[in-house]
Amino acid sequence: MLPDIDKVTALISDVAAAEILPRFRQPDRQEVREKGPGDLVTLADEAAERELTRRLSALLPGSVVIGEEAVAADIRVLERIHGDEPVWIIDPVDGTGNFVAGKPVFGVIVALVRGGETLAGWIHDPCTGRTMTAARGEGAWMGGERLRAAAPAAVEAMQGIVNARFFEAPVRSHILAAAGRLGRHFSQQCSAHDYLAVVTGSAHFALNALIKPWDHAAGVLMHAEAGGHSAKLDGLRYAPTDREGGLLLAPDRESWRALRELLFGV
């Protein structure tokens, strides 16, 4: 059922080299526009998604594709996730705002999902050439090295990612005030790099209000395969079919509970 992990890795790297990197820091080749308030899209997003869609569907006959830009054009594309076919979920340029600003904090995220379960995931950093991969039950890997999430630590010693922007104002204010009791917190505006941090153990945790499947389906699998614990904010397990509920990733279940209590008071 699963395609060769390394073949997919090479495919993603090829597309990034051909369609994304040549447009990075080249404003005349980006043609930036808004698809929604503050939500940017460029030629790199569109070209990379077209090529990934074509090549991934050919690699796995019978599969279908959900791309972030295709969903932006037609929300009905998202319903493919409920079908019986294997589904490629693509974020062609995650961190488009950083890409447009010339910051090398963006990536390509690909997940393979079937029956509401993520089977495999890839996160590629075009600027460094790093690709993090995982297949269910086979661990998370990068450059031939098996990855491990950070070890548990006291809450006041934890450092990690707090993406508070999309929480409602009172909740956002409480989160940001409480986060001052953590060791360190930051936001990168890029799910790809957030997962690179938590799966490699350079960050203890990550908090998100939005749980779009192209941002999280691959990374949640990788984090679990690296030994981490994640759940929606109500404590229920995340699935790529979920549309709301927020998401918190931590080293283990006890750390998750301690972080939720600190950040939300529950």
Image (cartoon, helix red, strand yellow):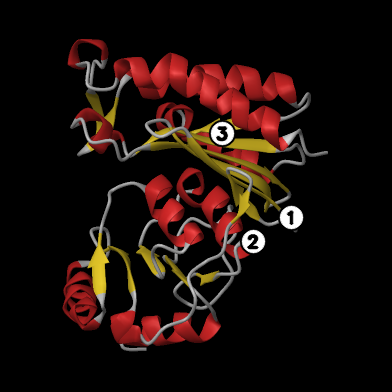
> Up-down: is 186 above or below 69?
below
Dot 1 and dot 3 residues touching (CB under 8 Å): no
- Label 1: state its secondary structure: loop
Task: Give the CA distance from mark 1 to mark 3.
Answer: 24 Å
Residue at position x 61%, y 56% in the image:
221
**Residue at mark 3:** 66
Residue shown at 39% from the left, 54% from the top: 194
What residue sits right under mark 1 in the picture?
Answer: 138
Q: Earlier in the sequence, mark 1 or mark 3?
A: 3
The answer to whether residue 47 shows anywhere in this view is no
Spatial separation of the CA atoms under disc 1 and disc 2: 7 Å
Extreme residue toward the top, this view: 28
- Which of pointers 1 and 3 indicates the residue nearer the eye? 1
Residue 34 vs 28, above or below: the answer is below
* Position in image of residue 158 (x %, y %): 34, 77
Residue 225 is tagged as 2
Callout 1, which amino acid?
Glu
- Camera-side residue of 81 and 188: 188
Location of the C terminus (image quadrant): bottom left
Q: Are marks 1 and 2 in contact (CB under 8 Å)?
A: yes
Which type of secondary structure does the marked residue at label 2 adopt? Answer: helix
> Residue 185: percent from the left, percent from the top?
25, 68
- Tell me which amino acid carries mark 2: Glu
